[in-house]
Amino acid sequence: MAREKQMKRTHSSVFAKREVSPPATKRKIESTTTREAVANFFKPPSKKPFQHLAWRTVDNSCLVAKYSTRPPVDNQAVPVKKRVAAFDLSGSNFLTRSLLPKDGTLILTKSGNTFPRNEHDWKWWNHCVPGRIKELYSKGYQVVIVTNQKKVLLKKVGKGAIGDSKSLTIFKSKVSMILKDLDVPLSVYAATEYDEYRKPRMGMWKLMLDDYDLDVEGVLDLEGSIFVGDAAGRPADHSCVDRNFASNIGLKFYTPEEFFLGKPQEGVEAFNPKNFILDGTSRSSLPFPESHGQELVIFCGSPGAGKSTFFWKYLEPLKYKRVNQDILKTRPKCLSVAAEYLQAGDSVAVDNTNADPETRAYWVKLAKEHDVPIRCVYLSTPASICAHNNAVRAANPRLESLNPEKRTFLPDVAFRSFASRFEKPQLSEGFEDIIHIDFQFEGDPITRELWAQHWV
């Protein structure tokens, strides 16, 4: 018992000697907000410090920077109608054999790399660029920059990520340096998504007209306005979006070599969708000879060639049943459904690409098994039109006349895959007939006007 009491005394004495920590207190966080910033926040707008550059984002897609000067740059010649001088930006670097930069409009990389290393890796395309832009402003032009920037992410990616992405931070810093060097009132419009704002589509132009109140009738001098860009469809160019952008709007187009250096125009065989529009609103005769008995019809054509449109316009009214792998997902399922239709006495149209003889052989075999003739409808739509159709329908999901099935944008791999496998269909494969269809767009005036624009 005495031993037990001794242990208790020893145990309690240990606790008695142990120091008890004081209760935790909140650590004081030093504010990074300065008194000046707080004071500016409560100042009326007229008394706040002047900001040369203001940024905003439209529709979570188009990035807009507006640069202003104070005091304003003296703009002596202000015409009755406002002319616009629009420029692509660019920033990559590619030199041709003539040593003239081919991939840039206002700027190039200072390092000589194809793509910039950082926000400081830029220089003017030519030493005369800043002077020419200031000259345009002094003559009364509204100067703007319109650029596709698909590599700029507006937000950080990842769980819990907030704030600007690294690519956006770099882009803003570079644009800020460019505009500060120019020191001319202008706006920059940057399309970061594949949507209505991306050139050659006119979203950035329409946004600019609204920003500067140039969308009022009689205010804009379109004939006197210009657009300068390097994507002009020349052999060394990466695309033709700048020339097509100008064409959509009706602007006089120049390459940087033409506008800044006075070089002669290069001949370019530009794609024009208007060349593929049917003269009338519809064909004068049925392009598909009607069969008077049960049959199997298969299409052969690239994605975007017009296969589904052909079915709904010409075969569905004749009560053909449609089999489509985009809907049924697998070839075995397509063959099974087609067999059921044939067994029921229906004629069938196979709305797939059917690029090669091996694929088409499945359908020839099925026709023989059901003792029905098989014909092939070959749609030889050019690749440029297929890409155009793909873009038009994806950009107009709510317009039934252009996209009745709400198709989304197909990636380039779908077109490359077809091209790599394609072999022109032959009668020797077992077809009773091959009907060759050249593409011609049909539609009402509003649909034709939309389709006739450049979208790629």
Image (cartoon, rainbow, N blue to C red):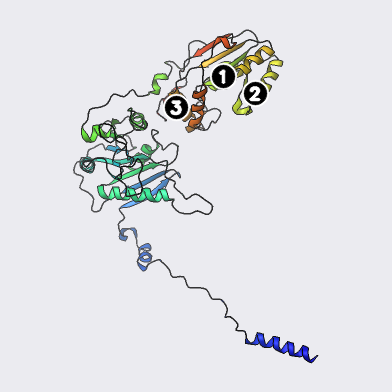
Residue 307 image position (x, y, % from top left):
53, 21
Residue at 62% x, 84% y is 18
Residue closest to the eye, 4 or 75: 4
Return the residue at label 2. Answer: 334
Ranked by sequence position, the earlier of labels 1 and 2 is 1
- The local secondary structure at tag 2 comes to helix
Q: CA distance from mark 3 to mark 1?
A: 20 Å
Where is 83 relative to 348, above or below? below
Residue at 58% x, 80% y is 21
Disc number for residue 52: none
Return the residue at label 3. Answer: 388
Residue 396 image position (x, y, % from top left):
48, 32
Return the residue at label 1. Answer: 311
Q: CA distance from mark 1 to mark 2?
A: 16 Å
Amino acid under disc 3: His
Residues under numbered marks 3 and 2 in contact, where contact means CB atoms less than 8 Å apart = no
Q: Specify whether 59 is left or right of 333.
A: left
Where is 282 relative to 111, above or below? above
